[in-house]
Image (spheres, rainbow, N blue to C red):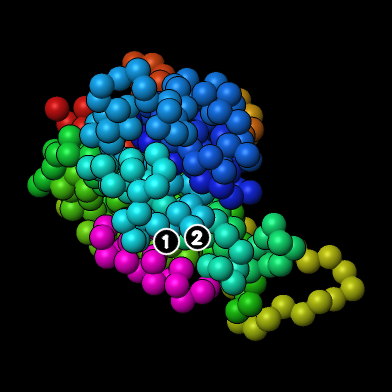
Amino acid sequence: MACIILGITGSIAAYKAADIASALVKSGHEVHCVCTAKALEFVTALTLHTISRNPVFSSFEDEKADWVPPHIQLAQRADLLLVAPATANTLAKMASGIADNLLLTTYLSARCPVAVAPAMDLDMFAHSATQENLRILRSRGVRIVEPAEGELASGLSGKGRMAEPAEIAAYVGTLLAAENPEKKKHLSGKRFVVTAGATIEAIDPVRFISNHSTGKMGYAIAEALARRGAEVVLISGRTSLPTPTGVRRIDVLSAQEMYEASVREFATADGAVMCAAVADYTPEEVAPTKLKKGDGELTIRLKRTHDIAAELGAHKAGRILVGFALETDHEEANAEGKLQRKNFDFIVLNSLRDAGAGFGVDTNKVTLIDRAGREELPLLSKAETAEKIADKIESILK
């Protein structure tokens, strides 16, 4: 995996750097921490050394043993420099080219992509000087992990708190996947259908039946396939996510609309990844006006929707079909049953019982199951999980 320099500066959010380092290490990355002196007042070098499994550098005094300073060696071979948290002071110095500590010297020596996760009070973040510094850094290619809104260390509430470690780790996964020169266009000339998000089944003009899916996993898969050169059609249920670059998106609402679009698009596709959370049942009748509250019980009769994956599996004719199974009990048995019944090449199993997996989060923990066996993946960002799925699709095509 990648070699990442994690730069840590003197913010109260520095304690979260340990969680960032842990997430990156668990994703298989080589992590080297470079801290400012003030950062070590919030988090100890021993903690970072234990988590990263590498020496922690904080001053030029740490480098006496080598003729070529370690920060130069790291800067030359790193795949990413991530500064998290990045204080207003550090951002200002980066924008001005000041190199008065080891981290800033490392930044000026880096040949790799650079990302920063700002962390400061809301007024400091909103100040025109800080915004100008961020504009300068963006113009030089530095990526900004936008801070979140919420309660700040000052007791105030607003935009300025550092993004959560899981969000930063997910951002890193996406960034590295996009920058990785080894991810050649192996899927050029191939056309894939990806379904994502939740369907909604109308009860009346106001109410509907749906689920908690946000579409994040499916969108990450569509993006990963497109980066590898595939023509990707993303059939999307309800979601607030932006369309991935290079992907053609078809918006649908109901399971019936997703069925029709999937069958139509699969007819000329080389494969499909069925990641959407499609309703299994829909109301037999949709009330033409809003149902009024009465004194008694309300019964809504439901009917089965089309099984989209089974329909495509019955007509796949040598094409690739990948399924998803989100289970809460007898996970592997249920997933293996779906693998056979729906004629999948492999199925991606995740469980709501796994911490960090499921709806709305930026991480996932899955098991890839095919007829030859199982491959259990560690907790990864959804971008990294998507890359693993794309890798397996490529291996089938070879």
The reply to whether the C-beta atoms of the residues labelled 1 and 2 are less than 8 Å apart is yes
| Image quadrant occupied by the C terminus | top left
Nearer to me, 107 or 174: 107
Nearer to me, 342 or 193: 193
* 250 is within the stretch colored magenta: no
Residue 78's x, y, as percent?
A: 29, 34
Q: Is residue 374 above or below residue 270?
A: above
- The answer to which quarter of the image holds residue 309 is top left
Mark 1 highlights which residue? Answer: 92
Say left or right for 261 vs 377: left
User: What residue span does the magenta drawing correspond to?
Assistant: 126-145
| Residue occupying the point 31% across, 56% down | 97
- By secondary structure, the bulk of the magenta-drawn segment is best described as helix
Q: Is residue 7 above or below residue 353?
A: below
Q: Residue furthest left?
A: 189
| Image quadrant occupied by the N terminus | top left
Say left or right for 95 vs 199: left
Which amino acid, by three-letter code, is at mark 1?
Answer: Ala
Residue 334's x, y, as percent?
A: 53, 28
Nearer to me, 347 or 247: 247
| Residue occupying the point 22% across, 59% down | 246
Q: Is residue 219 above or below residue 324?
A: below
Nearer to me, 366 or 378: 378
